[in-house]
Amino acid sequence: MVEFKDYYQVMGVARDATEAQIKQAYRKLARKYHPDVSKEKDAEAHFKEVGEAYEVLRNPEKRAAYDNLGSNHRKGEEFRPPPDWNSDFEFSGAGRGAADYSDFFESLFGAQARAQSGARGFHSDRGAAHRGTTDDGEDHHAKVMLDLEASLTGGSRSFTLKMPELDAEGRLMSKERTLNVQVPKGILPGQQIRLAGQGAKPPGSGGKAGDLYIEVEFLPHPLYHVDGRDLSLELPVAPWEAALGATIKTPTPGGVVELKVPPASHAGSKLRLKGRGIPAKPPGDFYVILQIALPPAQDEKAKAAYAAMAAALPFDPRANLGV
Amino acid sequence: MSPTPDQALQGTLVDESALFSIEDLCRICAIERRHVVEFVEEGVLEVATVGAEEWRFHGGALRRARIAARLQRDLELNLVGVALALDLMDEIRHLRREIRARR
């Protein structure tokens, strides 16, 4: 069954909207739902729908043909195009590469229109026109969230990738597949993993499958803060450890180390452990940022210690404030 | 083509040391050569091998080129707008990472 699609409703414009109004509506919706910039849920699916509606309504010939179906169809209702419904129209779509359109679109404009009209909103970067004479499948792209440990030690992780597509009835569906991937050690946020042959299947029997490019971003880590290839840790120290210097056990990605805190350190002091960041090429550094933790003055003994310190140290923490 | 769950796929790391030719870029991002030339001229993409006979691009160019091509096509942006949007998107990414790290 092919469901009728109300392109005017998708675009939020009246049936008698001008070309300028349609263009304006498209631009607004495209910005709202563009998968590269949108934070909306199901942005990609919405974007495809809007792209298809615009593809029809922006083109005077297609729009006239669509309008010719009459306004008594309802959204979602079963649709069968009348025979010869578009026999008087001549389609002259300008090619921008083919996209995935709903069955409704294809029942109206056919595979020919599909091959020659715009590639809006489909993010496998389809574009037969751009690929020249290749028989190979397209390259696909995806983005995943990765734990920092996967980059620190390497290892396999499984990712479930969703790909929005229109099912046989023109409904937006999300197709899933799970891939178990060996994560290259030292991968940095924003970098990609190329999986050869995991893109689209070749269109014919001759070519080879496209590749899949997975861009990674790190999940927040409980201890370490990632900055490019460098890692940092906020390490709490006691006031006397900072003031007098100390050797302190510190977690690092490579295991616990004995860290030498120099005397006269202060809050925010940064200690660098060279090459102990993300094991990229070249490896990043590991920074320890000192935080001074104050012991609570809960009992008489602790209060006495603070009082002794106050008596012994001519210290004014507000010397710079002019009070 | 789909692997068994216990068999991990071996991937190649696309980092800054991976260099891509203009043909690679066109194929992977499904764009035309003239787009790449325009992107370079407008500063959307940087050539990694300045002065060399053949252009080569760093791994990061793959992401930028793809997004640039989509923004240009889908939002009908001109190249200056694309370059600006990409720079702002980079900044947003950076800020998001900072925020995540501080939570």
Image: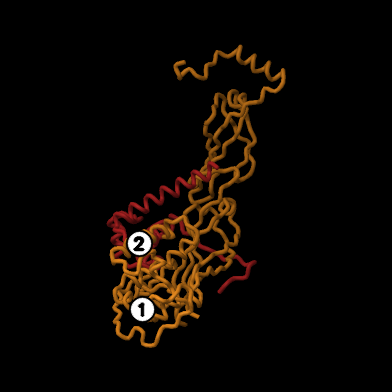
Chain colours: A orange, B red
- The vertical placement of B24 against A285, above or below, is below
- Disc 1 is attached to a residue of which chain? A
Tell me the kind of residue under disc 1: Ala
Q: Which residue is mark 1?
A: A113
In the visual, does A169 lie left or right of A88? right
Q: What residue sits 63% from the left and 31% below the top?
A: A247
Percent of width and height locating residue A316: 52, 16
Q: Are marks 1 and 2 on the same chain?
A: yes
**Do labels 1 and 2 touch, CB within 8 Å?**
no
- The mark closer to the camera, 1 or 2, is 2
Q: Which residue is mark 2?
A: A25
Local crowd at mark 1 within 10 Å, few (<14), some, or many (≥20)? some
Q: Locate residue B10: give its quadrant.
A: bottom right
Q: Which mark, residue B83?
A: none
**Circle 1: element type:** helix
Q: What residue sits 29% from the left and 78% below the top?
A: A92
In the visual, does A31 lie left or right of B12? left
- Disc 2 is attached to a residue of which chain? A
Residue B41 seen in the current view: yes
Percent of width and height locating residue A70: 37, 78
Q: What residue sits 29% from the left and 82% below the top?
A: A90
